[in-house]
Image: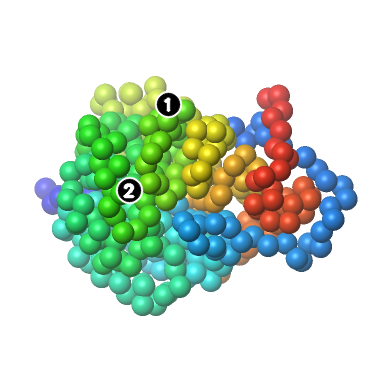
Amino acid sequence: MESDTEQFESRKREHLQLALEPAHQAFGLTGLERIRLVHEALPDLNFHELRLDSPCLGRIERTPFYVAGMTAGHADAPRLNRTLAIACAERGWAMGVGSQRRELEGGGGKDLDHWRRLREEVPGLFLIANIGISQLVDAPLERIQALTEEMGAQALAIHLNALQEVLQPEGTPRFKGAIQALRRACAELAVPVVIKETGCGFSGETLRRFHGLRLGAIDVSGLGGTHWGRIEGARARPDSVHAAAAMTFGRWGESTAESVERAREMLPSAEIWASGGVRSGLDAAKLIALGAHRVGYAQPALAAALEGLEALKRWMEVQEYELRVALFCTGSATPAELRSSQKAIRVEA
């Protein structure tokens, strides 16, 4: 019989493997398919002078890009994390990590050692810790603060994954008291808090509940990318209620584009991060035009990282170049200028 540690590592390994399969990607549902950017035929710009500098939790980073949290909690994670960390630090991307439930609950000493060693090797990395809302409700805030300090994180992402938790056979769908726990975390933690979804986006009603929270940022992580409901359905026994329900809820969620637009309207002073089905620098440009300050990639970055460091850096270079092309061809000198313009228009499907 597998130990709890073996079961945990097996689940995390399965998550990464299944995330690479096209069947678990909600293609065509980001809402970006119905957004286009207005072309400027005569930009008053020199391409080589364009800058990608963008805000990030009270500081300015070289790009608006980040790798969303994916890799933690299994034997292959250190190698992947090292590849991602080196590339992110070199190109000025922030890096999120996968769920750190095990470290938070005291069973992840090796994981913390890994983060310490990585910090020493890549000191310039902007690193974002990551726990689930269920863990925030249950764990002492002092332990959460200690986790961020032990790994040298500059921010903490708290992920909301209601659909995944309720469809996961080992899930912990205990969200009661979550808004109170979020309010306390935002007020008392020494690092900025990023509230993020995990592929199902945000409704306007949910965003309204965040009014008054001292948020670092909100990562909409909308429908259109990796769908964790589908993944948990694939992990479940074929004859289980979890597998049956996962089929029913395979298109559940709020699109990435609509989630960004709602966040801009509902939380006008918030720093908005957009992830969920982002597959190109043009997708990133559309989301910036809709109101995003930062744009994140998950599954495409994972696929590139599995090919090695040079392949990952080349892929990142392409994303940056495509964003620059979009800036130039909309007459925008910076992402901020694109965000403040009215260059995004909705077209009929």
Which residue is disc 1 drawn over? 205
What number of labels is visible?
2
Q: Circle 2 sits in a helix, a strand or a loop, which is it?
A: helix
Which residue is found at the position 36% from the left and 28% from the top?
A: 246
Type of amino acid under label 1: Glu
| Within-10-Å neighbours for mark 1: few <14, some 14–19, many 20+ | few
Residue nearest the observer in this picture, 9 or 166: 166
Image height of 342 relative to 334, above or below: above
Quadrant the C terminus occupies: top right
Disc marking residue 186: 2
Residue nearest the observer in this picture, 193 or 212: 212
The residue furthest front is 212
Mark nearer the N terminus (2 vs 1)? 2
The residue furthest right is 42
Q: CA distance from mark 2 to mark 1?
A: 20 Å
Q: Could you say which quadrant of the image residue 27 lies in? A: top right
Residue 145 visible at all: yes
Which residue is found at the position 39% from the left and 22% from the top?
A: 248
